[in-house]
């Protein structure tokens, strides 16, 4: 299964198959544009523009991560070097949004990798990606400190980020003063909507 087929199956079923071949082939822009169109219908406000190159970069990382999970003969150093290759697009909310179209599946990949082995080098690399892309890693355990400043600058991504925190009960994200303030404002007079977050907001300085 090449990369476009992988993405189609992932989008339709939440599950996909990877091959052990080196070539990933094919263009993914049409697929991610379709995901973008669907995503925009359910977003709180207007999302940043899609950056196809960023989404494609993320798609290749996700595909390779899945390969590393099932093709255990891939040398850890080779796997790490590939997953650490930086996104070629300048940092921006638009890039965060575009990468998230694909990396929203990252928590599932990490959960499967941890079931194989918590000491697997793949887990370490996936956690590094999770820290670098905080919009996609809300709710993931063990991520550590993230920088959400870019997300908070964009009204749509800020609300999406806060909504995910409230929904997942990810209290670790409240270590950021700006995130904590935004979460408190989002809950308002309805703390029962996210009791874990509401409790943490009361106890977090």
Image: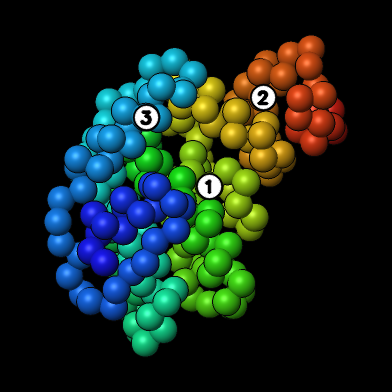
Q: Position of residue 198 (x, y in %)?
A: 80, 28
Q: Of residues 151 and 193, which is closer to you in this image?
A: 193
Q: Quadrant of the N terminus?
A: bottom left
Q: Nearer the viewer, mark 3 or mark 2?
A: 3
Q: Residues within 10 Å of mark 2 (few under 14, many from 20)?
A: many
Which element is circle 2 on? helix
Q: Of residues 111 and 9, which is closer to you in this image?
A: 9
Quarter of the image where one finds residue 53: top left
Q: Position of residue 83 (x, y in %)?
A: 34, 64
Name the disc covering residue 123, or none. Answer: none
Label 1, label 3: how far apart the Cα atoms are? 20 Å
Residue that extends furthest to the left in the rendered view of this protein: 26
Label 3, label 2: how far apart the Cα atoms are? 26 Å
Q: Position of residue 20 (x, y in %)?
A: 28, 78
Q: For mark 3, what is the residue?
A: 38
The residue that appears at 39% across and 74% down in the rendered structure is: 68
Name the disc covering residue 137, or none. Answer: 1
- The answer to whether residue 104 shows anywhere in this view is yes
Label 1, label 2: how far apart the Cα atoms are? 17 Å
- The answer to whether residue 144 shows anywhere in this view is no
The residue that appears at 53% across and 70% down in the rendered structure is: 113
């Amino acid at each position: 299964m090449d990369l476009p087929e992988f993405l189609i199956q992932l989008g339709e079923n939440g599950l996909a198959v990877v091959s052990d071949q080196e070539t990933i082939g094919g263009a993914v822009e049409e697929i991610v544009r379709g995901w973008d169109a669907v995503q925009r219908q359910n977003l709180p406000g207007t999302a940043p523009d899609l950056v196809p190159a960023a989404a494609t970069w993320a798609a290749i990382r996700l595909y390779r991560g899945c390969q590393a999970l099932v093709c255990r003969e891939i040398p850890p150093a080779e796997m790490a070097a590939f997953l650490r290759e930086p996104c070629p697009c300048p940092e921006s909310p638009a890039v965060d949004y575009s990468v998230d179209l694909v990396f929203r599946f990252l928590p599932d990949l990490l959960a499967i990798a941890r079931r194989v082995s918590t000491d697997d080098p793949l887990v370490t690399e996936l956690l590094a990606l999770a820290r670098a892309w905080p919009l996609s890693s809300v709710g993931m355990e063990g991520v550590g400190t993230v920088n959400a400043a870019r997300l908070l600058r964009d009204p749509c991504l800020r609300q999406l980020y806060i909504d995910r925190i409230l929904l997942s009960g990810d209290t670790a994200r409240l270590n950021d003063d700006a995130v904590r303030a935004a979460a408190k404002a989002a809950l308002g007079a309805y703390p029962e909507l996210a009791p874990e977050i509401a409790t943490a907001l009361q106890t977090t300085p």
